[in-house]
Amino acid sequence: MKGILDTSSDTYRKLMGNGFKYEVPKFQRDYTWENEQWDDLWQDIESLIKEEDSEHYMGYLVLQEIDNKNYFIIDGQQRITTLNLMILAVLKCLQDLINKEEEAEDNQKRKDTLFNTYIGFIDPITLISNNKLKLNRNSDDYYKTEIVLLKDRMSIRNTNSSQKHMRECFSWYYEKISKKYKSGIDLAKFIDKIADKLSFTVIRVSDELNAFKVFETLNARGVQLSSSDLLKNYLFSVVDSEGYNKTNIDELELLWSKLIEKLGTQKVEEFIRYYWNSKNKTVRKSNLFKSIRKQITSKMLAFQLVRELNDEADVYMALQNPEDDLWKMNREIQNLIRILKLFKVKQPQSLFLSAYRNLDENNFLRLLQMTVVISFRYNIICGFNPNEQEEVYNDISLYLNEHRRLNTEKLKQIYIPDDNFELIFSSKEFRRNSQSHKLVKYILSEIDKYKNHTDISFESDLFTIEHILPENPETDWQQFDDEAVSRSVYKLGNLTLLEKSLNKDADNISYEKKKELFKESSCKITNSIPEFYESWTESSIASRQKRLTTEAKSIWKIQFNN
């Protein structure tokens, strides 16, 4: 990838013992590791020491080059900081031996060598440490003046959360190491072993824009890196560039913390992209940071963005949760959001944000209704590529921002015509999985509601999906050979709603016996099956699916104004 300087596999010794220096960006997140993470790492190290030839993989480390000897740590600071605190705990154990005059001269040499190799050096006149690792604005001063100097009594008053975590981490490892290793030789061997057996995949990039692209690439592969931190760092650096002002930074920190709290488990950068695309021409994940960096260039704009993100986060979270208080006064909106959640479509999210801020409740409801129909036809039944949808939704969103009214004509571009919809629906299959199960319940319950005025919820636990031709048919189904079963069993025409209390008796019984069960069902589309189909064959399945198609075409339909 352009902008990546190199990728390598480096040991902890190679990273820290080569004259390089590393800096955690000023506004990077604080140190947050706790007992659970410290113990996980300790257990891994214990295993390393027992197994002479093994190594432990520490994951990705993303570095941004400042110059050929200095790097920002863009991702990996929690791990690097923890390892440095562990090394300092070993140095404290060596200092204890020196104070007790146990091989004092040799242990002093060991301590000095290890300190210079992994930590840095202390100016003999000022007693100020010049460290290989510089932490963020909330952590570095305490790290330099308290922990690196190995004070017997570190300050505990007026310390922030990051400083508290660092002090406790240092103490935690100091207790473990001092109990296990009693001599200077053993302490030195401990560091020597872990330094060569802890390895990282190191990605060096030329600038923060390329770091963001690395995050997006790796996150797409399931490696969750902190691309949201990079966005935060940039916004804070913009504010800081106009002159450091503690009040401004604290206010921005408070706003950002509120945003993170509101979003909970939702991905921050995903929400920011939806928000950004609700006001700007669509940008892909890989270009989000570039677009923000291009437009947000002043303190005023940075504050404006973070405040607007806070405001819109409430709506975004409500769009993910049909039970949110925002919808409690409108059951129709609540139900539509429940359906969209079932569909798992994300393309309209930016449009919904724009619509909520620009439309009244009735028009917002109308948009949701149309989006459900479009999503059902386009995404659920036809399974077409959603990229085109996102462009259309974005065009409507930008029009909304400018004119404060809905342009439904543009929706025609992604509304699947009846002919295409019928063709695909008439042969649609739903393989067995939890998502398909819910979708089939939704489709059949909506058809039953439309045709027979029933009210069976697709979320009801009382009903399940019955395969009329069983998935594993026995002797009573000899009219279907193996190929016919394969062609037919997952067709929508072979599926119906049935009470769980009746379904347990259905299993592999013959169609003749199933007809009697179906007659007992309160679901009209099920108890009417025996009326229409004396026997159950491939032709029966095709016929029933055609009937369902006709009804579906009428239910999931938009009447555009010509």
Image (cartoon, helix red, strand yellow):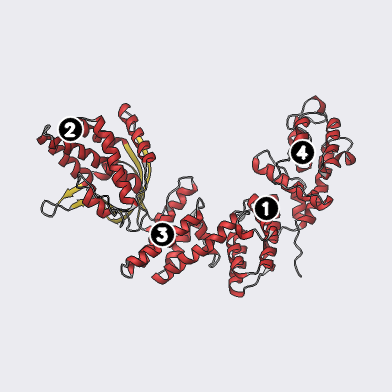
| Residue 322 in picture, x, y percent from top left | 63, 54
Mark 3 → mark 4, Cα distance in angstroms: 51 Å
Which disc number belongs to residue 184?
2
Report helix, strand or loop for mark 1: helix
Label whose residue precedes the other's in the sequence (1 or 3):
3
Mark 1 → mark 3, Cα distance in angstroms: 33 Å
Label whose residue precedes the other's in the sequence (4 or 1):
1
Observer-nearest residue: 286 or 459?
459
Task: Judge the density around disc 2: few (<14), some (14-19), many (≥20) Cα neighbours within 10 Å.
Answer: many
Quadrant where the C terminus lies?
Answer: bottom right
Task: Judge the density around disc 1: few (<14), some (14-19), many (≥20) Cα neighbours within 10 Å.
Answer: some
| Residue 189 in picture, x, y percent from top left | 22, 32
Label 1–label 3 contact, CB within 8 A: no
Label 4–label 1 contact, CB within 8 A: no
Observer-nearest residue: 81 or 412?
81
| Residue 103 in picture, x, y percent from top left | 11, 32
Report helix, strand or loop for mark 4: strand
Mark 2 → mark 4, Cα distance in angstroms: 73 Å
Which residue, as the protein is rendered here, is positioned at the far front?
Answer: 157
Label whose residue precedes the other's in the sequence (3 or 4):
3
Q: Which residue position is annotated with label 1?
A: 339
Q: Which residue position is annotated with label 3?
A: 232
For image coordinates 18% across by 30% down, the residue present is 183
Q: Which residue position is annotated with label 4?
A: 499
Mark 3 → mark 2, Cα distance in angstroms: 44 Å
In-image side of 270 versus 505 (left or right): left
Which is in the foreground here, disc 4 or disc 1? Answer: 4
